[in-house]
Every structure is written in structure tokens, then in C-alpha cells.
Image (tube, grey):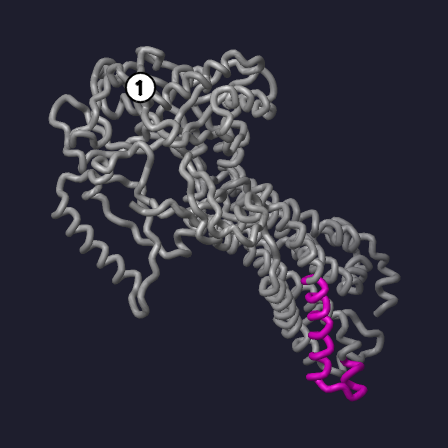
């Protein structure tokens, strides 16, 4: 028998031991057992151990209420962390585990877990988990925004430097070298980029403080988010590289200008070479195309989030407060004692003003809890225990269904008749009844084996059918779910659910006195309202949707600025040409049509390319969508229309300005 010792985290040491330098050797009580502290650990990564893991003991195989004989028949709660030897690859480790698994199957052929295969993941894969698709989506969005910004800057710099050809020619005529001119203008662009990087870093300091609030508790964010030195240096480095890359080509092209043309009398406005004009139009098309992809992705995620947030859960969350309670095995060693505790607590809560209804269970919807147990129909030829599927099984007290407004569709509810020494019963969900009893067969009165007891399982009679509930994830229905009486399947960790007559946030003040009258030594753990739990379950999707929406908005603004800037500079540089056209009889509508057509041509090309790219890349976010097609034509059409309208407005403003050109003033500059 191992000693009762434990390691505690740095957080626990600070909060509960007052950072006592002599904490080693102190005794704390865990589940009613005196336990000696033998070490203090740095705070463990929440990606691996959860947000509230503070104590590590040396009894990983000990679960209160689980006998050694049942443990040896196979359970599924173990998690092994190992470090590969030098030179050993992950594939080699997986192959070795397969050999061990085969040996285990031969040695214990009847165990419940001998048909399961171990899953080997790297630490990074385990930490990221199902967040990997969202991270890739956001990384792609950031890259697209950066590319749009780069093309925007390059376009504006190219137009600006083209407009300064006379200045460039004058500098070179006075002895400036071509490389010197290039350095001057590259320095200007890098300075602008550096200033923008500093401003962006300041904005990032605010953004990282907001992200945890948006994400809820579904992202592994330890102690919030902070910007460290490598991130800051990387940001500033990207800003400088952007300025260098975006300023180099326009400056070099402008420095190659012909001195004679540049120094001609009057400094006639120039629109640049044909190659530069094509490049500028290509950059505009690229901005529009990337914006289409971002806007389409954001629209799909928003539509998916709205649909998911409106997904019926199968229960009513209004005015429900929940919290967990741990029962020390020393005080509550068996099912009878745990059942008595639950009965006394529920009796106290029922007599508490402000509590309309209360129930206990081993877990509440969308908050975890509830184990998976092997199951099989008793009639016919039930499969061996090690070949049976696992079904989500909840232990509930009488009144649980009413507290959560889960409808009883047939049969009866669990009630006081279903005690520890009474015949075993079970409720099944509607989906479970259809799966186990197809063809309209009535499941009431039928029996199901549960667990691994006696190498066959415990036979439970089906006494009722209840509505389907989204118990684990909002985006995934449970194909199988069972409800068994708490008195017949209890655990040392339970959840209390209370429906209040007013706002549930104040329910803790009602539950604590009732719990104290039953057992004053027990604390309330993880109190929350069901509305908060549902909101937290959407945290990851809300974060991805919000950030991608922000990036799409930024892309839209950048595209509008880029289009407006390019068209406005073109109009300014073509003032003389426009004046000549108007002097020769061109009407206002003709000038307006000319400018808008030339400004919208690259936009239309970008829209076409963007729609095709959005269709091709839509499959990359399919896994993050809920009941929304990645190729939704309505969303793509709305995205294209939005961008087209924005681009048209960006073209109309300088086009309208062009129609106001005075032909005499324009010709005078010639």
C-alpha cells in the first residue's frame, strides 16, 4: 500500500498555504484522508490537466467505489504520459504499443478493454486537440489580411512614386545615384510600416485582454494572454520586412524614369508605364479576391454560429443553477450513504424559499460528467462484454427531468421506488429506443445489460423513454443515452441542480446554508448557471467567428481604401486628359462612366477569382460549420454583392470629383 502523499501546484501553494516556505511535510486532508505534502510543482499546463488541477497523488488506480476485482476487468480512464528515448520515433512507439496490446488481449481475452486500441498523440497534438482547424483558419485569415495590406501599400506607393517622377528626375539630374533614390524611398516606406507596427502592437495589447472573455472556458489560455518579447520582435520584424518588400519595387521602377520626360516643362502628370498600370490593376484584383475569401469564410462561420446557438438543446436552461460536490469516501463509503446524503440535501433544498426544484446527478448537460458504459440487450444473444459498444450513462435523482424540463415520452419517471435495494431500472432517450428497438418495437419492460459485473453486466429494466438532449456538444446529438437512478449508480462526485424562482446567480446563497445543515465540511465546486455553461460551450466557435469577422472587416476596409486610393490618384494624374475630353465635348456621364469602368474592371476580375477560390477553399472550414454548406450560393452572392457595392462607392467618389474638373483650369496645366 502506497503512502498518502501528494504534490501540489504553485497556485495551490500560494492560495491555500500562504506561500509557506516550510510547506513540505505539512498535512492536508483529501477526501477525509490525511495526506502529506512532499513537493511543490510549477503550475501544470491546463492543456493537459485542466484548469483546476492543483494536487497530484500517488494512487492513480484508486477510484472510490470501484473494487479491485472490477478494476482488473478493464476500465477506460487511464492516460499515460511518456517521453520517447533518443532516436525513437512516434511510429516506433505506436508499433511497440500495438505489440503490448496484442499480448494483453491474449492474456486477458474476456476483459472489457482488450478490444480497444491505445491512441498515441504528441504533446503538441494533445494540447491543440480540436482547436487545430480553428487555428489554421485564423492563421490563414491573418495571412490574407497581411497580403491585402501589402498589396494595398504596394499599390499606393507605386502610384505615389509615379506621381513624384519629376522630383525623382530632379534629384538624379542634380547628382543623386539611382541606388540612393531607391534607399530614400524604401526608407520612407519602412518608416511608415514601423510606425504602423508600433500602433498595431498597442492595439494587440488591448485585443489579447479581450480574447479570453470572448472564448469562454473552451480554450486552453493559461492566466490569460500576454505579448512576450519574441512576439513583439516578430511583429516589428514583419512590419519592417513588409515596408522593405513593398517599397523596393515601386521605388526601383520610379528611379528608372527617363530624365528628359521627367524634367519636361510643367511636369505633366503621368500615369506610369503600361506595365505599372497592369501591376496596379493586378494588385487591386488580388485585394478584392482575398477579401472575397475572407468575407465568405466569415459569413459561413457567422451563419453556422447563429444556427448552432439556436439549436434546441432538449432541455430548458432558464433559472437553473448548478454546482459540484465531492463526497469523501471515508464518510460516504457506499451507495447507501451517498443516497442518504442526496436525499437529505434534496429535502433541505425543497424547503428552501426561492428554490422551486432541485435534483442531483453525476453530471449536467454540456458540463461534462456522466460515464460511458458497455451495454447490450438482454434478449437474444448479447455480445461479449469486450465487444459491446459504450453508451453515455447518467445517474439522476427523482426530479431531474422536471428540473431540466426534459419531456417524458412514454412509461414512468425515476422516483422514490428506485432505491439501492430495489430492482434496477433505466430510462432511455428517444434516439436510443429507435436504435436498440427498431421497427416500432416497444422498449418498455425490456432489459439491458450495463457494465462489466459478473462478466455479463447488470440487467436493468427499461421503465421510460425521454426526449433527446444535447448532453456533450451542441453540434452533435447523442445516438445513445441512458438515465439510471442515482441511488443505484452513485459516485463520490455529484452535481446539484436547482431551479430558482428568480435570477439563478444568487442561488449559491440559498444552497450553501442547506448544504451546511447536511454536512458543513463540504465545499461547493464550480458553481455556474446553465446559461453560462451553454455560453461557454460556444466559446471556441464564438472566438473563431469574431476574429475572422474582424479580419474580414479589416480586409473590406483595406480593399475599399486601396480601390479608392488607386482610382483617386489615377483621376488626379489624368486631370489634363479629362479636361481635354470635356473641352472636346465629353459629357459628365461619359467621364463618370470612363472612370468607374476603369476602376471596376480589376474589381470584377478579383470578384470572379475570389468566388472560385472561395469555392475551392470552402472545404477547409467544413469541419467548423454546423448545418451550413461551405458552398452556400446565397452567402457567396451576398459577399460578392457587398464587395461590389463597396468598390463601386470607392470608385464613384473620385469619379464624381473628375466630373467637376474645369476644362480651362485643366488645360492651363498643359
Position of the C terminus, as image quadrant, is bottom right
Q: Is residue 113 above or below residue 551?
A: above
Q: Nearer the viewer, residue 347 or 155?
A: 347
Overall secondary structure of the magenta section: helix
Q: Is residue 301 visible?
A: no
Q: Label 1: how many residues lie within 10 Å, few (<14), some (14-19) or many (20+)? A: many
Q: Is residue 467 above or below residue 34?
A: above
Residue 148 % position (x, y)? 60, 58
State the image quarter where residue 451 is shown: top left
Residue 255 % position (x, y)? 70, 79
Q: Report the residue that reaches farthest toward the bottom.
A: 175
Report if residue 173 lies within the magenta region: yes
Please give the range of residues in magenta: 169-197
Mark 1 secondary-structure assignment: strand
Q: Nearer the viewer, residue 166 or 617?
A: 617
Q: Residue at x 26, y 57 (%)?
A: 94
**Total numbered badges shown on the rendered structure:** 1
Q: Nearer the viewer, residue 166 or 2?
A: 2
Residue 237 % position (x, y)? 62, 68
Residue 65 % position (x, y)? 31, 32
Report if residue 598 lies within the magenta region: no
Q: Which residue is mark 1?
A: 427
Lateral position of residue 587 relative to residue 8, left or right? right
Lateral position of residue 34 relative to residue 207, left or right? left
Amino acid at each position: 500500500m502506497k503512502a498518502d502523499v501528494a504534490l501540489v501546484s504553485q497556485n495551490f501553494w500560494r492560495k491555500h498555504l500562504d506561500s509557506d516556505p516550510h510547506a513540505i511535510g505539512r498535512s492536508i486532508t483529501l477526501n477525509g484522508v490525511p495526506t502529506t505534502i512532499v513537493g511543490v510543482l510549477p503550475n501544470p499546463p491546463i492543456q493537459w490537466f485542466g484548469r483546476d488541477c492543483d494536487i497530484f497523488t500517488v494512487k492513480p488506480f484508486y477510484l472510490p467505489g470501484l473494487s479491485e476485482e472490477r478494476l482488473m476487468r478493464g476500465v477506460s480512464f487511464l492516460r499515460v504520459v511518456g517521453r520517447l528515448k533518443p532516436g525513437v520515433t512516434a511510429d516506433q512507439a505506436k508499433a511497440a504499443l500495438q505489440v503490448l496490446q496484442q499480448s494483453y488481449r491474449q492474456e486477458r481475452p474476456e476483459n472489457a478493454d482488450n478490444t480497444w486500441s491505445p491512441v498515441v498523440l504528441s504533446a503538441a497534438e494533445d494540447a491543440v486537440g480540436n482547436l487545430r482547424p480553428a487555428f489554421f483558419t485564423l492563421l490563414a485569415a491573418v495571412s490574407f489580411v497581411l497580403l491585402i495590406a501589402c498589396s494595398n501599400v504596394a499599390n499606393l506607393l507605386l502610384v505615389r512614386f509615379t506621381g513624384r517622377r519629376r522630383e525623382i528626375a530632379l534629384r538624379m539630374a542634380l547628382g543623386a545615384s539611382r541606388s540612393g533614390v531607391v534607399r530614400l524611398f524604401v526608407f520612407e516606406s519602412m518608416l511608415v510600416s514601423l510606425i504602423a507596427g508600433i500602433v498595431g502592437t498597442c492595439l494587440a495589447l488591448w485585443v489579447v485582454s479581450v480574447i479570453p472573455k470572448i472564448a469562454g472556458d473552451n480554450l486552453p489560455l493559461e492566466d490569460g494572454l500576454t505579448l512576450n518579447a519574441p512576439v513583439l520582435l516578430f511583429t516589428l520584424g514583419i512590419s519592417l520586412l513588409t515596408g522593405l518588400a513593398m517599397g523596393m519595387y515601386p521605388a526601383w521602377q520610379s528611379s528608372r524614369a527617363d530624365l528628359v520626360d521627367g524634367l519636361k516643362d510643367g511636369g505633366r502628370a503621368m500615369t506610369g508605364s503600361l506595365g505599372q498600370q497592369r501591376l496596379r490593376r493586378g494588385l487591386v484584383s488580388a485585394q478584392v479576391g482575398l477579401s472575397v475569401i475572407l468575407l465568405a469564410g466569415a459569413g459561413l462561420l457567422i451563419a453556422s454560429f447563429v444556427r448552432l446557438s439556436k439549436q434546441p438543446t432538449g432541455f430548458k436552461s432558464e433559472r437553473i443553477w448548478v454546482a459540484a460536490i465531492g463526497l469523501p469516501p471515508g464518510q460516504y463509503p457506499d451507495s447507501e450513504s451517498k443516497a442518504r446524503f442526496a436525499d437529505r440535501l434534496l429535502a433541505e433544498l425543497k424547503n428552501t424559499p426561492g428554490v422551486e426544484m432541485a435534483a442531483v446527478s453525476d453530471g449536467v448537460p454540456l458540463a461534462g460528467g456522466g460515464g460511458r458504459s458497455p451495454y447490450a440487450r438482454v434478449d437474444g444473444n448479447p455480445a461479449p462484454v469486450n465487444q459491446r459498444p459504450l453508451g453515455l450513462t447518467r445517474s439522476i435523482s427523482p426530479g431531474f427531468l422536471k428540473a431540466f424540463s426534459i419531456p417524458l415520452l412514454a412509461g414512468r419517471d425515476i422516483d422514490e421506488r428506485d432505491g439501492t435495494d430495489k430492482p434496477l431500472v433505466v430510462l432511455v432517450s428517444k434516439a436510443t429506443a429507435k436504435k436498440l428497438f427498431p421497427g416500432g418495437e416497444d422498449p418498455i419492460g425490456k432489459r439491458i445489460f450495463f457494465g462489466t459485473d459478473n462478466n455479463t453486466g447488470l440487467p436493468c429494466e427499461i421503465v421510460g423513454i425521454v426526449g433527446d438532449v444535447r448532453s456533450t456538444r451542441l453540434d452533435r446529438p447523442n445516438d445513445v443515452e441512458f438515465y439510471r437512478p442515482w441511488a443505484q449508480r452513485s459516485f463520490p462526485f455529484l452535481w446539484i441542480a436547482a431551479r430558482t424562482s428568480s435570477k439563478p446567480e444568487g442561488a449559491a446563497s440559498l444552497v450553501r446554508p442547506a448544504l451546511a445543515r447536511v454536512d458543513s465540511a463540504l465545499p461547493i465546486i464550480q458553481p455556474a448557471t446553465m446559461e453560462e455553461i451553454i455560453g461557454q460551450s460556444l466559446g471556441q466557435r464564438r472566438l473563431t467567428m469574431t476574429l475572422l469577422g474582424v479580419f474580414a472587416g479589416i480586409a473590406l476596409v483595406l480593399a475599399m481604401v486601396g480601390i479608392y486610393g488607386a482610382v483617386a490618384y489615377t483621376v488626379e494624374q489624368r486631370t489634363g486628359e479629362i479636361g481635354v475630353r470635356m473641352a472636346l465635348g465629353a459629357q459628365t456621364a461619359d467621364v463618370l462612366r470612363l472612370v468607374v469602368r476603369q476602376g471596376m474592371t480589376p474589381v470584377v476580375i478579383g470578384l470572379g477569382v475570389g468566388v472560385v477560390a472561395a469555392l475551392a477553399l470552402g472545404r477547409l472550414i467544413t469541419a467548423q460549420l454546423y448545418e451550413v454548406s461551405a458552398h452556400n450560393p446565397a452567402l457567396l452572392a451576398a459577399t460578392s454583392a457587398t464587395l461590389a457595392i463597396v468598390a463601386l462607392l470607392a470608385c464613384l467618389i473620385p469619379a464624381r470629383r473628375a466630373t467637376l474638373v474645369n476644362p480651362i483650369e485643366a488645360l492651363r496645366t498643359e
